[in-house]
Amino acid sequence: MKLRHALIVFKKEVKDLIRDKRTIISSIFLPMVLIPLLNIVMSGGVQSFEKSMNENVSIALSQDSNTPEIRKLIQDRILSVNPNLKLVDTGDPVQALKNEEVRCVIGFESGYAEKIKQGMPFKITLQYDESKTKSRTSVDIVSGAIGEFENSIVKERLAALGISEDILKPVEIERQNMAENNQGSNMMLQMFLPFMIGMLIAIGGIPAATDLVAGEKERYTFEPLLTTMPDRGSLLFGKYLAVTLFSFVSVAAILTGLVIGYVVNPNTLTMGIDASSYGGLSIQPLALLLAFLITAMLGMTFSGIQIAISTFAKSYKEAQTYLSFLMIVAMVPGYATMFLQPGDLTTIFFVFPILNTIAAFKMILGGVINYGSLILALGTSVLFVALTLWIAASMFKKEKYLFRS
Amino acid sequence: MVEVKELVKKFGDFTAVDGVSFQVSKGEIFGLLGENGAGKTTTLRMLATMLRPTSGHAILDGYDTVNEPEKVRSHIGILFGGETGLYDRLTAAENIAYFGELNGMDKAAIKERTRQLAEVFGMQEFLGRRASKLSKGMKQKVAFARSIIHSPDIMLFDEPTSGLDVSAAREVQGFILDCKAEGKTIIFSSHTMSEVDKLCDRIGIIHKGRLVETGTVEGIKEKYGDDDLEEIFVRLAGVK
C-alpha cells in the first residue's frame, strides 16, 4: 500500500462525491436540516400540546349541580385560584362533553352545603370522556384544583377547632439530589445527543460506500481503475478514507444543525422540554477528546464494514439493500441504550462499537468521568478498526467478489 | 514484447483458460479470436494483472504479472468494449488526469500530454465538460486518451468495438492502427472475424479456454486451404 496512491484516489473520490447530489443530500443536507427541523417541529408540537392541555380547561356543572350557589362556590373557591379553568354554562353538559365543548363535567352531591357545615364528607363526581386526550388529562387538572379546595376546607375546620394544620403532617419528606454538576438535569440531552452521534457516525458513510465500490462496478469504471499502477490496498485505502470522511461530515452536519436549532430555540435540542437548566453543564476537555477519538474510530470501523459490503454486492441496488440492513443493526444498540442514565453504564458498554460511543457521550454529558472506561473504549475501538479494515482489504483482494457482476 | 506461457485460470471446477501460450512482438497486433465465453477476457484480465493465474505465467516488457504487477500495470494501457467506464461527474480532462496521476505522472506532464492527445483526437472543445454531458463518440475519444495518457508500450483491447455502430467501430480500429504505428505491442480480442482479418498481424483462435491455432492470418488461411476465416474458425472449434 502506498499512501501517495491512496491520497490520489481519496482526492478524486471526494471531488466525485461532492458533485453527487444523492450523497450530498443524504450525507450533509438531511442530517444538517431535516433532523434539527424535525426537532423544531416536534418541540413546537410538544410545547403547543402541553399548552393546549393545561390552558383553558373548560368545565361545566351537571344539570343537578348547576345552581347559583354552586356556581358561586366554584367561582370563589376553585376558579379564583386556578385561572386555567373556565366554567362554561350549558344546558346539556353531557352533550357538551361529547361535542368537546367542555372537557369535564362536575357534579356536586345534593345536600353538600349541609355536609360541609356538619364537617361531613361529600361527593363530587367528575364526568369525562376517556377516548379524548384533552378530556382525559383534564381530570387530573380538575382533581388537583378540587384537592386544593378540599385542603382549604380542612384548614378552615382545623382553624375553627384551634388546631395547627401541622397535625396532619407527622412526617416531612425532604429530597436531596446528590448528583454532581447538574447530573441528571440534562436527561433529554443524554438520551438524544449520544444516540444521534452514534447512529450518524455509523451510517453516515453508507451513501459514499455504496457509490465508491458497488457504484463503480455498475458504471464499469472499476475495471479500468484496477488496471492502473497502484495496488489494490492503495485503491481500497483511498476509498476507505473518503467513506470515513463522509461519515464524519454527516456528524459535523448534524451537530451544526443542532447548534443552529439551539440558537434559534434552546428547547429544540430537548424535544420541547425546558432546556433552561442546561446552562450548568461542564465538560472535561480530555474526556471530550477521548469521546471524539472513540467516535472517529467508530466511523472508521463502520467504513470498513460498508466498503466490505459494497465490495461483496453485485450491483448498486444490492449494496443499498445490504447496507440498509446494516443501518437497522446499528440502530438496535442505539435504541437499547437511549433511556440509560450515565450511572447505569457498566464496563461491557465500553467494549462494543456504537455502545461505547453512546456510553462515552452519556458519561461526559452526565459529568462523572471514568477515564478507565473511556480508555477501554478507545482500545477496543482500535481493535475493531483493525479488524474491519482487514476484512475490507481481504474482500477487496478477492477476485470472486471484485468480478461478481 | 509479451510472452505468455501455459497460462491457466480456474474458477472452482471450471477451467476458463487452459494452458494458453503465445508471444507478441513490439509493433505487432495479435488478435485473440473466439466466441463469447471462450476465455479471451479472462486471458486479458490475467495479462492486466486483474486476475491471478492458477498456473503458468505471463511476462510483459520483461515483468512478471504475478511477481511485479505494479510494473506490468505501469507499462500497459487497456481499452474495454461496451461502456467506456468514464467517471460521469468528472470532466473529460479530469478523467484523463486521474489515470495519469495513478500511473505516476506529475501534473505538468499530464497537462502537456493531455494537450497533445486533445489535438490528436480533436477533444479541445469538450475537455472541460463533464463526462455525463458527452456524446458516445466524445466519450470514446476520452477513453482512448485515458488509456494512453501514460504512453504505455503495450495495449490491451478487450472487444473494443462491441456494441458500437460502424463509424464508432472505425474510430476504434483507426486508434488501434495508430498505436501500432507508434510501435506499441497490441493484443486485441474479438469475436468478429472480419475485424481480426483486417487488423491483426497474427491471430490465436481460442476455444473453450484452449488456444487451438496460432499464426498469421494468411498462414492460417493457407494451412486450412480456405480464404474464409469464419469457416476455418467453425472447423477448428468443431474439430479440435
Image (tube, rainbow, N blue to C red):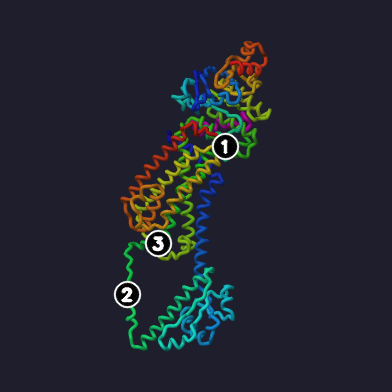
Q: Earlier in the sequence, mark 2 or mark 3?
A: 2
Residue A2, image quadrant = top left
Q: In the rendered structure, which amino acid carries the disc numbered 3? A: Asn
Question: Mark 3: which secondary structure?
Answer: loop
Q: Which mark is residue A186?
A: 3
Relative to the observer, which residue lies in front, A239 or A203? A203
Q: What chain does badge 1 belong to? A: A
Q: Residue at x 44, y 44 (%)?
A: A302
Q: Residue at x 58, y 14 (%)?
A: B215
Q: CA distance from mark 1 to mark 2?
A: 75 Å
Residue A316 position, x and y percent, is 55, 40
The residue tagged 1 is A219
Q: CA distance from mark 1 to mark 3?
A: 49 Å
The residue tagged 2 is A172
Tell me if residue B110 is in the magenta stretch: yes
Tell me if residue A289 is in the magenta stretch: no
Residue A277 appears left or right of B15: left
> Of tags 1 and 2, which is closer to the observer?
2
Q: Main secondary structure of the magenta part?
A: helix
Q: CA distance from mark 2 to mark 3?
A: 28 Å
In the rendered view, would you say A165 is above or below A100? below
> Of tags 2 and 3, which is closer to the observer?
2
Residue B219, image quadrant = top right
Can residue B104 be seen by looking at this rendering? Answer: no
Q: Which residues are magenta?
A: B101-123
Q: In the rendered structure, which amino acid carries the disc numbered 1? A: Arg
